[in-house]
Image (cartoon, rainbow, N blue to C red):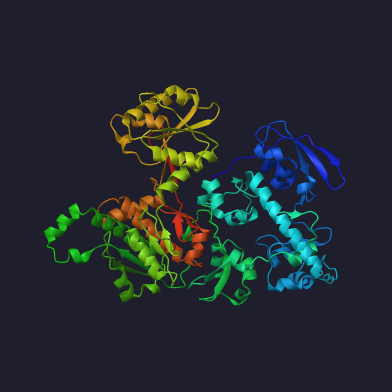
């Protein structure tokens, strides 16, 4: 989805020179934020807040802000005078190490070699420490000897001053902490942003619920808590290097054991680091990745944004040199019908919806397997009966008897609890397990892939779309749906709610008063009452000549199928909704339908199509030069009716974020919103 466009306005800039800095005056225009202004002048929001404390409470049009020149010392009252470190080299040729910085990254930043950096700072061969002050030699310059260490008396004095400063800083943060805005930059993760501002990942997500599904470049976050740590102006950097309390590796990193089939590439993507940064943390990786290695990794995993990958046609990059194995665990439950007569089996097929769903999924999977043979894919497919119901299965015996650890990917079982059990048994072997149909989420194993987007993610995707269009969002929520109202209020503060009359009916006047001219108005309707649906539609149709309107629902609503609700009215309002599947009439989809009908004498239903899509997607991912997991990081795919855009969960495993935003067009067809 496209991000909001920033509006650039010509500013009146007045410069003046002070003894210790050079500040600029900036006049705020309508709609500007501190983050936008900071980006314009290439400073940080904290620089602006320091010189303009009132800006923390919001900006007013025509207000005048003082903007420090980039890299300058920011003037604050003597009681709280601080220095903002910039990534540029200081006058004395030093650099204070920030979180996640590496020797390789610093050498590249200052255009010097790692060897010169280590020669000037011998101690960094054991690793960098946050807050450590490094000497930065100029390129081609003889590396100077390091200064002598301070005396014990100087150390004690500096340590005492540092403790006092930390105490005052904590006290100040407790009394004056305000919300700070931050615009997401390319390659930033929630982990790195949380570290930058000294808050936890949980605090960041609580303040910005939309980030649970990933970050988007340009997205403006509200930061709750303390600003990034800054140094006291009169503190000597050289002294701090020796007396500051070193941050232990355990406070920033965890140990991670390398599993089979993992590569340096997949590990770097998994932990949000570049390959060089991962090697800097774990020098032993220079000799290759080995199963069982214990690596230092960030103690909080970043989450990939759902929109960060391009949709890719994997049929164009097939590799057939390595033979792979795909296993399907499907609940045929053959032991229950093995002794039944033909008539009994036919009766069971008429009544057993779960068995019919299994057979439909299986029939679609067979078409996918036939398609793989046509493409010449080098894959063995094995199919086992999982013999499952809600409470039991034969997964354990199947695992032992057939050595599933040799599989490259497993699809199934159907029930979530059994899919989790399978993932647990195959976790040490790092065999991906795809849960094909369940919308539930429970235990998150690192090798478990939820292929069905959850109901909550569908709702989030709908709100993300409306906000990306800069829409005015109004909600008509039935008083009986208190949970839905709370969900919207807790997660989307920009949504306004229509009120109801004393008799419980929708107030048309209230609804109309919330609409905005010259802007798309999205009206979210959540009710099971046919009467309330009709009154909402009537009010919107009456307002349509004056306003841009679109009706929105967050999930399927059986009440809309009532004969009292005219589909033509829903089409006039272009009713929009999130969905897992789409209607597809492309040539590829028609070929699939034709193949399926030829083999089964019937057109495919949703479960048959799902069986094809999940299986064919897995077959294609197995047939790439990259590993299956690497294709997950790099490629989102789209098959007949389903998208597969897997993203890593913070607690482990992967969820599919592939969602369609659909709407009724005026010709009564269903189309995808772009």
Number of marks in the rendered image: 0
Q: Quadrant of the N terminus?
A: top right
- Residue 528 relative to residue 245: left or right: left
Q: Position of residue 422 (x, y in %)?
A: 36, 66
The residue closer to the viewer here, 216 or 254, is 254
- Is residue 85 visible to us here? no
- Residue 444 relative to residue 200: left or right: left
The residue under the point 18% across, 64% down is: 336
Q: Picture quarter containing residue 239?
A: bottom right
Q: Position of residue 419 (x, y in %)?
A: 36, 62
Q: Position of residue 608 (x, y in %)?
A: 31, 54
The residue closer to the viewer here, 655 or 483, is 483
Q: Position of residue 122 (x, y in %)?
A: 76, 73
The residue under the point 28% across, 68% down is: 394
For residue 88, above or below residue 206: below
The residue under the point 85% across, 70% down is: 144
For residue 373, above or below residue 22: below
The residue closer to the viewer here, 8 or 481, is 481
- Is residue 572 visible to us here? yes
The residue closer to the viewer here, 224 or 580, is 224
The residue under the point 60% across, 63% down is: 273
Q: Picture quarter containing residue 459?
A: top left
């Amino acid at each position: 989805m496209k991000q909001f466009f920033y509006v650039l306005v010509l500013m009146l800039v007045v410069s003046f020179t002070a003894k210790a800095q050079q500040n600029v005056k900036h006049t705020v225009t309508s709609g500007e934020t501190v983050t936008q202004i900071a980006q314009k002048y290439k400073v940080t929001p904290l620089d602006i807040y320091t010189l303009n404390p009132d800006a923390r409470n919001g900006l007013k049009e025509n207000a005048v802000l003082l903007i420090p020149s980039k890299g300058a010392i920011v003037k604050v009252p003597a009681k709280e005078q601080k220095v903002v470190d910039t990534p540029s080299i200081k006058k004395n040729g030093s650099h204070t190490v920030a979180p996640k910085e590496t020797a390789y990254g610093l050498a590249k930043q200052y255009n010097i070699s790692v060897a010169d950096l280590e020669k000037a700072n011998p101690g960094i061969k054991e690793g960098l420490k946050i807050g450590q002050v490094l000497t930065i030699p100029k390129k081609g310059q003889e590396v100077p000897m390091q200064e002598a260490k301070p005396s014990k008396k100087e150390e004690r004095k500096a340590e005492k001053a540092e403790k006092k400063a930390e105490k005052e800083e904590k006290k100040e943060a407790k009394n004056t902490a305000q919300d700070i805005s931050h615009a997401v930059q390319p390659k930033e993760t929630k982990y790195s942003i949380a570290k930058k501002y000294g808050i936890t990942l949980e605090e960041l997500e609580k303040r910005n619920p939309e980030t649970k599904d990933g970050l988007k470049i340009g997205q403006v976050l509200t930061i709750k808590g303390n600003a990034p740590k800054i140094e006291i102006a009169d503190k000597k950097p050289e002294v701090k290097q020796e007396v500051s309390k070193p941050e232990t590796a355990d406070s920033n990193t965890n140990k991670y054991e390398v599993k089979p089939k993992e590569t340096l590439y997949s590990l770097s993507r998994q932990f949000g680091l570049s390959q060089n940064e991962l090697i800097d943390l774990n020098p032993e990786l220079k000799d290759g990745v080995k199963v069982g290695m214990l690596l230092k990794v960030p103690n909080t995993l970043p989450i990939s944004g759902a929109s960060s990958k391009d949709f890719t046609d994997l049929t164009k990059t097939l590799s057939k040199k390595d033979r792979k194995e795909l296993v399907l665990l499907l609940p045929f439950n053959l032991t229950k019908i093995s002794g039944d007569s033909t008539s009994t089996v036919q009766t069971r097929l008429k009544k057993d919806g779960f068995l019919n769903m299994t057979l439909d999924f299986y029939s679609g999977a067979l078409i996918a397997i036939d398609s793989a043979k046509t493409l010449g894919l080098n894959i063995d497919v094995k199919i086992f009966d999982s013999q499952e119901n809600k409470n039991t299965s034969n997964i354990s015996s199947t695992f032992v008897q057939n050595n599933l650890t040799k599989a490259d990917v497993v699809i199934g079982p159907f029930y979530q609890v059994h899919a989790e059990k399978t993932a647990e048994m195959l976790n040490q072997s790092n065999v991906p397990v795809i849960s094909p149909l369940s919308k539930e989420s429970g235990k998150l194993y690192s090798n478990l892939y939820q292929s069905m987007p959850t109901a909550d993610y569908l709702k989030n995707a709908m709100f993300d779309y409306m906000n990306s269009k800069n829409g005015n969002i109004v909600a008509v929520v039935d008083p009986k749906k208190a949970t839905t109202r709370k969900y919207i209020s807790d997660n989307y503060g920009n949504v306004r709610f229509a009120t109801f009359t004393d008799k419980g009916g929708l107030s048309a006047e209230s609804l109309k008063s919330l609409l905005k001219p010259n802007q798309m108005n999205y009206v979210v309707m959540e009710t099971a009452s046919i009467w309330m649906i009709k009154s909402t539609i009537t009010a919107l149709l009456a307002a349509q000549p004056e306003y841009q309107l679109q009706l929105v629902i967050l999930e399927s609503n059986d009440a809309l199928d009532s004969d009292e609700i005219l589909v033509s009215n829903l089409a006039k309002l272009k009713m929009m909704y999130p969905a897992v599947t789409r209607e597809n009439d492309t040539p590829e989809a028609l070929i699939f339908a034709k193949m399926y009908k030829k083999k089964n004498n019937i057109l495919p239903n949703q479960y048959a199509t799902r069986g094809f899509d999940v299986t064919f997607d897995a077959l294609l991912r197995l047939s790439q030069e990259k590993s299956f997991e690497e294709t997950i990081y790099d490629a989102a795919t789209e098959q007949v009716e389903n998208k597969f855009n897997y993203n890593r969960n913070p607690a482990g495993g992967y969820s599919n974020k592939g969602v369609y935003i659909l709407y009724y067009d005026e010709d009564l067809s269903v189309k995808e919103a772009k």
